[in-house]
Amino acid sequence: MPRVLITPPQFQDPNRTYYKRLIAAGFEVRFASKPLTGADTKTLLRELEGIDGVLASTEPYTRDVLSQAKLRGIARAGVGYDSVDVPAASDHGVVVTITPGAVDVSVAEHTLALVLGFFRDVIGRDREVRSGQWTRAARPRLAGKTHGIVGLGRIGKSLVPRLQGLGLSVVAHDPFADAVWAASQKVQLLASDDLFRTADVISLHCPCTAETTNLICDRTLKLMKPDAVLVNMGRGGLVDEDALAAAMRGGHLFGAALDVFKVEPLPTTSPLLGIPNLLLATHTGGLDFQSEEDMSCFAAQNLIDLQAGRWPEASIINRQLKNGWKW
Ligand SMILES: NC(=O)c1ccc[n+]([C@@H]2O[C@H](COP(=O)([O-])OP(=O)(O)OC[C@H]3O[C@@H](n4cnc5c(N)ncnc54)[C@H](O)[C@@H]3O)[C@@H](O)[C@H]2O)c1
């Protein structure tokens, strides 16, 4: 009987639909004994003993882990897969899948929550009421500003009508952008430096790769308007956190909001924590009730398909394994 390990803590519930589908498809389902994000190799390997497939969170599937575990598939519940060493997975015949489209609305809504939360100072106002120290200080209006999207993929596209509905103009940078779609939606495509110079609010929705690591650094921060707002919804690796902290401590930027960090959970010693005009979130952009249901069922289905000899092409990252691959 094929055995699946479920690592996202929020999915560890036998009443969930995905669980019932895995059981109906003949899988034995095990829950990880603890949250594994950031786990060391030894801890992760202990959990992976006897496991064929993982319905995975962001725990690190390094070459070391992949060479010792006996996995056939890693089904990420989500779309980011930088926690998996994909070349190593391919070398060991492990198929890596994601759940494209399952989180777009959730991340778009979370981006809006952070942008509006910052512009309306939702947290600050709440604190004022609780302390009895009302300032009632006005803030800038969001409508009429220019929002720059870095990474006009599924999530970036899903954000466009929502921003436009709030009265923002939208510009975007994406080296592989769908220019026809962008033109049809009145989204102006810009070179990245031009976007950083132009936008009042910048949100990051691209993957963290060799090219995009520390995309936000001393140089690009200096290009941004002094009263710009930066929102990172992509991956922590996109932002040089020390450079951001230094720039903001020096009074640069109106503010920033971060849903993702280089190290998660963010260490309580992080220099970011001392910066007041910084809104922080717990990498929950992709999580609402519907996206959890959709992601867990989609990821489980990817494993069910692979085990049954089907090839869920659109979800697979290392498609070159197709010929001759067997569970
Ligand atoms: N905060 C969260 O909870 C959360 C949840 C889901 C996804 N994410 C992140 O969001 C990212 C985007 O997800 P998606 O489903 O839209 O993926 P996607 O693949 O549909 O879109 C990513 C886009 O980024 C573009 N891109 C690649 N390199 C770029 C570069 N150098 N500059 C600008 N754009 C570049 C790609 O061309 C693509 O269009 C994921 O990689 C993931 O890291 C975060």
Image (cartoon, grey):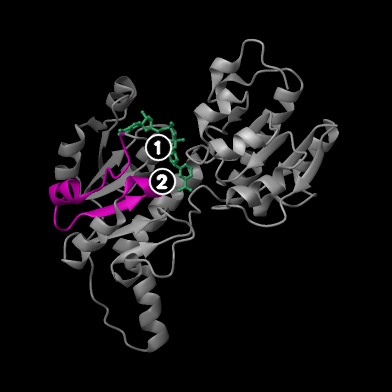
Quadrant of the rendered image containing residue 297? top right
* Left or right of 254 in this view: 283: right
Badge 2 element: loop
Give the Cα distance between marks 2 and 1: 7 Å
Q: Position of residue 41 (x, y in %)?
A: 59, 47
- Disc 1 marks a residue whose amino acid type is Pro
Q: Nearer the viewer, residue 112 or 320?
A: 320
Residue 271 point in image, percent of width and height? 32, 67
**Residue stretch rendered in magenta on the structure:** 211-239
Asked if the residue at label 1 sits under 8 Å from ligand 1, the reply is yes
- When the figure is inspected, residue 88 is found, relative to residue 55, above or below; the finding is above
Check disc 1 and report its element: helix, strand or loop: loop
Ligand 1 lies under 8 Å from the Cβ of mark 2: yes
The numbered mark at residue 207 is 1
Which residue is the site of mark 2? Answer: 235
* Image x and y of residue 5, in percent: 72, 43
